[in-house]
Amino acid sequence: MKRIFLLILFIAGSFFIWAQNTPDTTQRIIEGRVNSPEQQQKPYVIMISADGFRYDYAGKYGAKNLLALSNSGVRAESMIPSYPSMTFPNHYTLATGLYPSHHGLVNNLFYDRNLKAFYSMRDSKAVADGSWYGGIPLWVLAEQQHMLTASFYWVGSEAEIKGIRPTYYFRYSEAISVDRRIQILKEWLQLPPERRPHFITFYFPEVDHSGHSFGPDSPQTENAVHWMDSTIQRLVDTVKTTGLPVNFIFVSDHGMTKVDNDNTLPLPAAVDTSKFIVPPGSELVELYAKNKDDISDTYVKLLEDSKGYKVYLKENMPARLHYGIKDDVFDRIGDILLVPDWPKIFNFSSRKPSPGAHGYDPYLVKDMLATFYAWGPAFKQEFRLPSFQNVNVYPVVTKILGLNYTDHIDGKNAIADLILK
Ligand code: AMP
Ligand code: ZN
Ligand code: ZN
């Protein structure tokens, strides 16, 4: 009897562990939504992000499909990420047309003084909690105007923002194969017109992963770029079979650089951690004072101490970064900011950091620059343009899809006017 009981306990325990560790790969579908008759006449936009795909990777590594596709359409010399050049702030900037300080996701990990809580990209509860996210992401704007959307991942797409999620979406998981994702894309595009999504996002982390682990100049990163290149071609070929007027936007969130991971900077002795909240950071460390009276003393001490990094008060951050007191709409930027001089990084743990990183000021470190390519019936052909800021992607999408927005965004229409037919 006791043995049977133990066996049942073992099976139940194993099932519990399996259920906890098994990724959730089911497609979420919000029932009852349809495209309005007007929206059914509109074209389609597929926006693809290849995380960490530096502006020069396609040329550097001979990504022949991406070069050919962007040759046929629009290619920017590079795209300037918003500060800090991190994944979550920039994906959400691409989705909202707002600088990170204006949409609220000011870093991958940050502290909110008023909520007395941390947001972290590794905290799936926070990631899916819409109350952290400002602005009106493109899929919300479209759904508000009765145009259906789908997402195979994008920062914010799992959260209910302004009460809305994409009609078709997934919980973030790297467990779904690319074959399956392409198959699902095909199924979306073969749905009847009233249920077919017109704005679709895709996200791929592979190039960023190898850039971090092996550096931007490694054979592993070269392989990841080639893998991305062939995946895009498969995606494009699959879409072609549908015969639909689909426009592609291929972007990245930031670039990648080789950092000095042998001689890292420790947390300066001038920072008293009983007086400041200090979330871990490498290319940007933000200090949140528990008591504002402690700021100026610590700032002065840090200025005297600073070797290998710059110290800023939130009041004197360079204006071009839109990351100072004037821009801090959500009150989430640190009181004091420590910015290492490239290629230095901070490291507060005992583990050796990876050789590749990003997060630096893109106006100082060219390696931070991102990619923008676009092709399809709405785009001019064989069109080249200089570097532009990533807040300007939002109006490109709204113009193609004929969506109206009235809330303020930081992006301007000039880039859309320049690159669209
Ligand atoms: P970073 O440290 O800035 O390079 O962040 C990149 C990481 O963000 C990738 O390794 C992804 O695993 C992760 N990531 C990207 N999008 C999402 C998402 N929507 N939800 C959770 N994690 C994500
Ligand atoms: Zn990234
Ligand atoms: Zn990264």
Image (cartoon, rainbow, N blue to C red):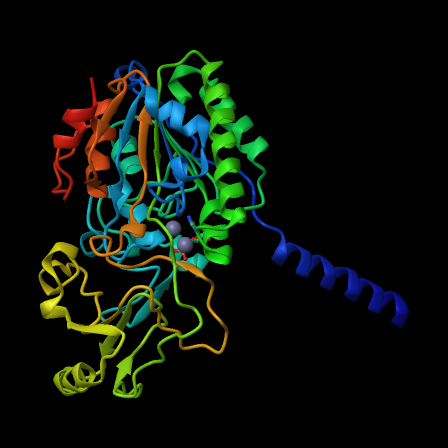
Residue 65 or residue 147, whichever sits in front: 65
Q: Which quadrant of the figure contains the N terminus?
A: bottom right
- 104 relative to 169, above or below: below
Q: Is residue 173 visible?
A: no
Q: Is residue 89 visible?
A: yes
Image quadrant where residue 268 sits: bottom left
In percent of the image, x 19 and y 38: which residue is there?
Answer: 392
- 162 relative to 44, above or below: below
Provide residue 59's location: percent of width, then percent of height.
Answer: 39, 35
Provide residue 330's location: percent of width, then percent of height.
Answer: 19, 60
Provide residue 4's location: percent of width, then percent of height.
Answer: 88, 65
Give left or right: position of 209 versus 89.
right
Q: How many marks?
A: 0
- 177 relative to 343, above or below: above
In percent of the image, x 55 and y 35: which residue is there?
Answer: 178
In percent of the image, x 25 and y 29: which residue is there?
Answer: 397
Image quadrant where residue 36 sits: top left
Residue 307 or residue 70, whichever sits in front: 307
Give left or right: position of 257 versus 383.
right
Give left or right: position of 223 versus 85.
right
Provide residue 86's location: percent of width, then percent of height.
Answer: 33, 55
Q: Which quadrant of the figure contains the C terminus?
A: top left
